[in-house]
Image (cartoon, rainbow, N blue to C red):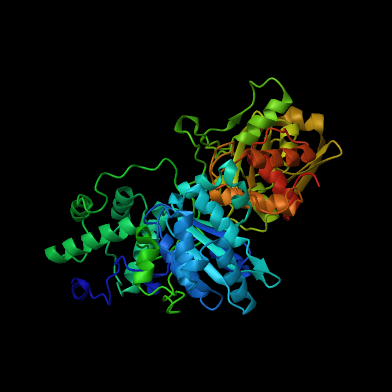
């Protein structure tokens, strides 16, 4: 309707999936590629989870299109199906006579097909509604195999409640079979801006149609839900067309926001925002309609063998959220203060648990030899293989790279050694006054540099001159907001932790947690903490993360 008015070659915010609107954000598609890889291996269960409107159906379309040469599809469109209904569906699709009803006849036919080289992919949407007996039956289907492999690969798609269902103790055998999980979350405000502008660019928009401030209004109205963003922006364009506007106004945005067709009620603000997203879909579409919609549109099936055109979906997570709001833990905006703690072990714990970015500013970061070369902050970034301008502040500089800044007050050398990262500090006194970079702490001696000057101090000499404040750089896991404790959820951070524990040899294989920080994970973290000389509190905080990174990557450290 309004395309010709704006000079568009298509509707930019249609809610039908379209691969032209593929939008990439954050790291490349490793989560989706892992899902595809595990599907092609065909020896486990796969999950796609996310709220309504976050793109689950789009993910299914893309994955099924990529797998069309690997499997024949069994798509069960029966929310809450009983095991008897699953048997009936499989008998019909496998063309088995009613007289042979039962699991064994299905298993025999699947084994026969597998011997002929045919593998099946069983897709069930809205899987959070499946009863436990049905899930157990599905697990048994996944066990059917011969020497050529598994006869059936299971792909479940559902809302976040699916993860909680699969975390039940009586489903632990099912959970142990899960190879990969892709969780889809709403867009952040920055991603919302890039998402909207990308879609406009795809249809040929070459001018600033909507401002950053107005995009923020869109984000607040939709909470970053792609489907709702599309619906609201479509309404905005329609109102602009009716009023003859080529640039959005706040009034138009607010009018479109008031249309009750968006959500039916005022959206609730989220308590936590996603931080990183490995891939984001520009189609944003129709997840709630499920496999039934897919079949109606020509989903590849056991009968017709047709496939969908490609498109993409988004992936991220809401991070650091406790299962009970009153117990939610958040990071502070003030420096860590350990002065009131009674012993050194508590100091370590408090410092580790405070993942903070401080507004503390040193009086000077020029160092003692500013004219001779790099300043301490530049030298710190150089240890990370990075280059920054001479006037940059350590914490503001970290925002440009995949690094975080940690500020510590009332520290001591034990704490500094436990973090084990080069740190910017300040010395006072008549001889070595100024800002320095601590580069090493070994054999009871501290090595510091500032420009071309390098000194070594004994522990006591250093402690006498140091103001007990430090700032350092470190790498957070994907999606990490605050220390993870029991019951908190962070899909990306949990995924990172499990990979790290496997590389460290502490865990063999993946643990299904639904993205939650479980007791088993906390116990494995305690094992690592014990081996590293850290406080064994089972909390995944900055100090534990830094110790893990020190073992697994070429990270600058104070103590080798």
* Residue at the spot 52% in from the left edge and 57% down from the top edge: 47
Which residue occupies the foreground of this view, 306 or 548? 306
**Where 284 sits versus 538, above or below?**
below
> Looking at the rendering, in which quadrant would you find the N terminus?
bottom left
Any part of residue 430 in sight: no
**Where 84 sits versus 546, above or below?**
below
* Residue at the spot 36% in from the left edge and 56% down from the top edge: 53
* Residue at the spot 57% in from the left edge and 33% down from the top edge: 335
Side (left or right) of 527 relative to 281: right
* Residue at the spot 67% in from the left edge and 36% down from the top edge: 538
Residue 369 position, x and y percent, is: 69, 47
Side (left or right) of 186 relative to 536: left
Which residue occupies the foreground of this view, 502 or 348? 502
Any part of residue 72 in sight: yes
Residue 208 position, x and y percent, is: 29, 65
Residue 149 position, x and y percent, is: 67, 69
Residue 182 position, x and y percent, is: 52, 57
Q: How many badges with numbers are in the image?
A: 0
Side (left or right) of 377 relative to 529: left
Residue 471's image quarter? top right
Extreme left residue here? 243
**Where 96 sits versus 427, above or below?**
below
Which residue occupies the foreground of this view, 218 or 160? 160
């Amino acid at each position: 309707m309004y395309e010709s008015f704006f000079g568009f070659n298509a509707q930019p915010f249609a809610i039908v999936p379209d691969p032209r609107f593929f939008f990439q954000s954050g790291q490349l598609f490793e989560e989706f590629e892992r899902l595809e890889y595990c599907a092609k291996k065909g020896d486990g269960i796969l999950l796609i989870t996310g709220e309504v409107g976050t793109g689950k159906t789009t993910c299914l379309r893309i994955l099924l299109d990529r797998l069309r040469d690997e499997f024949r599809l069994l798509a069960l469109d029966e929310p809450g199906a009983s095991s008897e209904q699953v048997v009936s569906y499989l008998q019909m699709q496998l063309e088995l006579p009613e007289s042979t009803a039962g699991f064994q006849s299905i298993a025999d036919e699947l084994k026969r097909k597998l011997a002929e080289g045919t593998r099946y992919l069983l897709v069930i949407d809205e899987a959070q509604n499946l009863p436990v007996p049905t899930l157990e039956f599905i697990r048994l289907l996944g066990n059917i195999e011969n020497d050529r492999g598994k006869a059936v690969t299971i792909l479940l798609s559902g809302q976040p409640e699916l993860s909680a269902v699969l975390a039940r103790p009586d489903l632990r055998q099912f959970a142990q079979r899960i190879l990969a999980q892709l969780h889809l979350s709403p867009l952040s405000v920055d991603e919302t801006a890039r998402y909207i502008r990308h879609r406009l660019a795809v249809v040929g928009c070459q001018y600033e149609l909507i401002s950053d401030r107005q995009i923020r209004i869109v984000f607040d109205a939709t909470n970053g839900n792609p489907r709702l963003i599309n619906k609201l922006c479509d309404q905005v364009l329609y109102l602009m067309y009716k009023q003859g506007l080529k640039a959005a106004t706040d009034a138009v945005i607010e009018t479109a926001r008031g249309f009750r067709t968006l959500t039916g009620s005022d959206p609730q603000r989220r308590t936590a925002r996603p931080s990183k997203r490995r891939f984001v879909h520009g189609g944003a579409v129709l997840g709630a309609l499920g496999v039934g919609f897919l079949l109606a549109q020509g989903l590849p099936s056991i009968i017709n063998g047709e496939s969908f055109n490609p498109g993409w979906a988004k992936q991220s997570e809401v991070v650091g959220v406790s299962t009970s709001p009153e117990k939610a833990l958040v990071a502070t905006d003030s420096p860590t203060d350990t002065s009131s703690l009674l012993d050194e072990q508590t100091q370590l714990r408090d410092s580790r648990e405070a993942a903070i970015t401080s507004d503390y500013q040193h009086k000077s970061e020029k160092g003692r030899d500013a004219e001779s070369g790099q300043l301490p902050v530049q030298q710190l970034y150089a240890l990370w293989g990075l280059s920054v301008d001479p006037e940059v502040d350590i914490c503001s500089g970290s925002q440009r790279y995949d690094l975080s800044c940690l500020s510590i007050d009332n520290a001591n050398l034990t704490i500094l050694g436990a973090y084990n990262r080069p740190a910017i500090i300040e010395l006072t006194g008549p001889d070595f006054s100024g800002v320095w970079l601590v580069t090493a702490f070994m054999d009871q001696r501290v090595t510091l540099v500032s420009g071309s000057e390098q000194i070594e101090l004994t522990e006591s000499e250093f402690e006498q001159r140091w103001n007990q404040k430090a700032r350092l750089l470190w790498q957070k896991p994907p999606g990490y907001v605050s220390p993870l404790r029991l019951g908190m959820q962070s899909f990306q951070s949990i995924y990172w932790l499990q990979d790290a524990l496997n590389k460290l040899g502490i865990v063999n294989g993946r643990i299904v947690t639904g993205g939650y920080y479980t007791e088993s994970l906390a116990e494995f973290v305690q094992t690592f903490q014990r081996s590293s000389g850290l406080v064994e509190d089972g909390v995944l905080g900055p100090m534990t993360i830094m110790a893990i990174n020190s073992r697994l990557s070429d990270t600058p450290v104070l103590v080798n």
